């Protein structure tokens, strides 16, 4: 899987977007305050930690 494949899959898979939301919550480590769903949506829409999530997801699929 490459970045383009991932980006296409991300745009079409709501479960992957849920995984991204969980990734943000697990990895924000105080860098960004996420106090409610609206703040989480704003973080997702701004692409917060997106590249890190993409790299982590692709790496996890390569190790299967």
Image: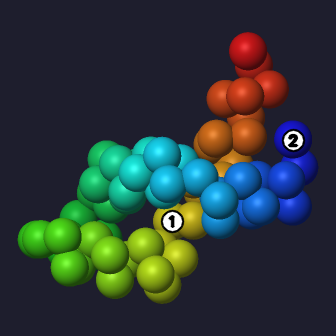
Residue 2 pos. (x, y %) = 89, 49
Along the line of sight, the residue nearer the viewer: 40 or 33: 40
Residue 27 pos. (x, y %) = 37, 52
Marks 1,2: beta carbons within 8 A:
no
Q: Secondary structure at mark 2?
A: loop
Residue 24 pos. (x, y %) = 37, 58
Q: Which residue is found at the position 32% from the left and 75% from the top?
A: 41
Q: Which residue is found at the position 87% from the left and 61% from the top?
A: 4
Q: Which residue is found at the position 53% from the left and 48% from the top?
A: 16
Q: Which residue is found at the position 85% from the left and 53% from the top?
A: 5
Residue density around tag 2, few if under 14, some if 14–19, many if 20 or more, within 10 Å: few
Say whether residue 33 is left or right of residue 18.
left
Q: Closer to the observer: label 1 or label 2?
A: 2
Q: Earlier in the sequence, mark 1 or mark 2?
A: 2
Tell me, yes or no, if residue 3 can be seen here: no
**How far is disc 1 from disc 2 in space, using C-alphas?**
19 Å
Q: Secondary structure at mark 1?
A: loop
Label disc, if present, on residue 36 of the rendered structure: none
Say whether residue 49 is left or right of residue 60.
left
Q: From the image, which quarter does the C terminus lie in?
A: top right
Q: Which residue is mark 2?
A: 1
Q: Does 64 sit above or below residue 28?
A: above
Quarter of image, res 52: bottom right
Residue density around tag 1, few if under 14, some if 14–19, many if 20 or more, within 10 Å: some
Residue 31 pos. (x, y %) = 30, 71
Q: Which residue is mark 1?
A: 49
Tell me, yes or no, if residue 42 can be seen here: yes
Say whether residue 18 is left or right of residue 9.
left
Q: Does 36 sit above or below residue 54?
A: below
């Amino acid at each position: 899987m490459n970045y383009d494949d991932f980006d296409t899959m991300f745009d079409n898979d709501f479960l992957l977007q849920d995984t991204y939301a969980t990734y943000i919550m697990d990895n924000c480590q105080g860098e960004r305050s996420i106090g409610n769903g609206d703040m989480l949506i704003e973080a997702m829409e701004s692409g917060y930690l997106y590249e890190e999530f993409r790299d982590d997801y692709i790496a996890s699929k390569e190790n299967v």
